[in-house]
Amino acid sequence: MLKRHRRFFILAAIFVASSALIYFVHYRIFENPYHIFIYLIGDLAFLPLEVFIVVLVIERILAYREKQSLLSKLNMVVGTFFSEVGNDLIANLICAVENRDETFQCLAIGQDWRARDFKKATLCAHNIKVSANCSGVDLAALRAFLIEKREFLLRLLENPNLLEHERFTDLMWAVFHLAEELEARPSVQNLPESDLAHLAGDIQRVYGPLVSEWIRYLEHLKSKYPYLFSLVLRTHPFQPQPSPVVT
């Protein structure tokens, strides 16, 4: 650290000395201090505007472009997660949702959806309630599925871009916790009601954020990749008869 500061002061001294030397040479040649000071004051007057343009305007433009590039990379990671794990998880856990009819109606995504519709659906996802006894969920199949996808999820967490996506990172940890809870039990058959209620809480922790992130991802697809969005419209589980076949 001291070496870095010393190098900075040395460079600063060299630049200041160079500027003073050039002004001295200018004075020796033209012998006109008025000419030197009038341009020096003019340059100093322009300096705040130059700092504004370089530091505030250009820096913000570069920061915006960097942020857009990062968001694009993040959405690729999120898309990979939903292709491999998220979509199946949403479909498998939908049986545990209590207010299923209301949820289906709220999340019936359409081609004509706008930003306000996606926002409304995100709020609806936060209100999804999971039944206290996990009725309808095949816990054994869910356990096997999450154990099978553990290596993929671990590789996903190694992506440094996820550090910039706090919501998605929290979702990943919730999924990992659910997988650990299920794997820790020798069997998930004939569990007592108290344990089922505990697992229901873990599923609740996963499902609302999972659907919320799915909706945000779909909004991105609609804007950037409409052909992918079209496939999701036909296959998502929040409709009576999902099918990839175009009719």
Image: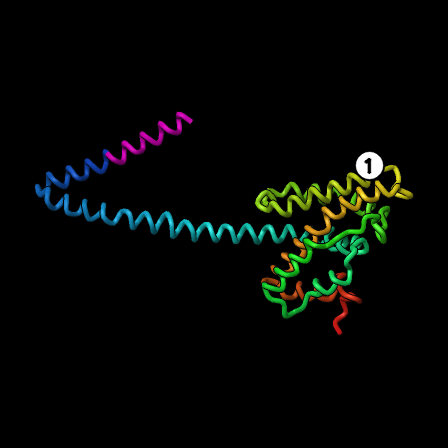
* Residue 215 location (% of width, % of height): 66, 58
Above or below, 60 against 18 in this view is below
Q: Which residues are magenta?
A: 1-16
Which is the main secondary structure of the residues drawn in magenta?
A: helix
In this view, the residue in front, 67 or 28, is 67
* Residue 67 location (% of width, % of height): 51, 51
The residue shown at (88%, 42%) is: 191
The residue shown at (47%, 52%) is: 64
Q: On the rendered image, what quadrant is the C terminus found in?
A: bottom right
* Residue 222 location (% of width, % of height): 62, 64
Q: On the rendered image, what quadrant is the N terminus found in?
A: top left
In the image, farthest residue toward the top: 2
Can the viewer see residue 153 in this picture? yes
Q: Is residue 111 left or right of residue 247?
A: left
The magenta stretch spans residue 6:
yes
Q: Which residue is mark 1?
A: 184
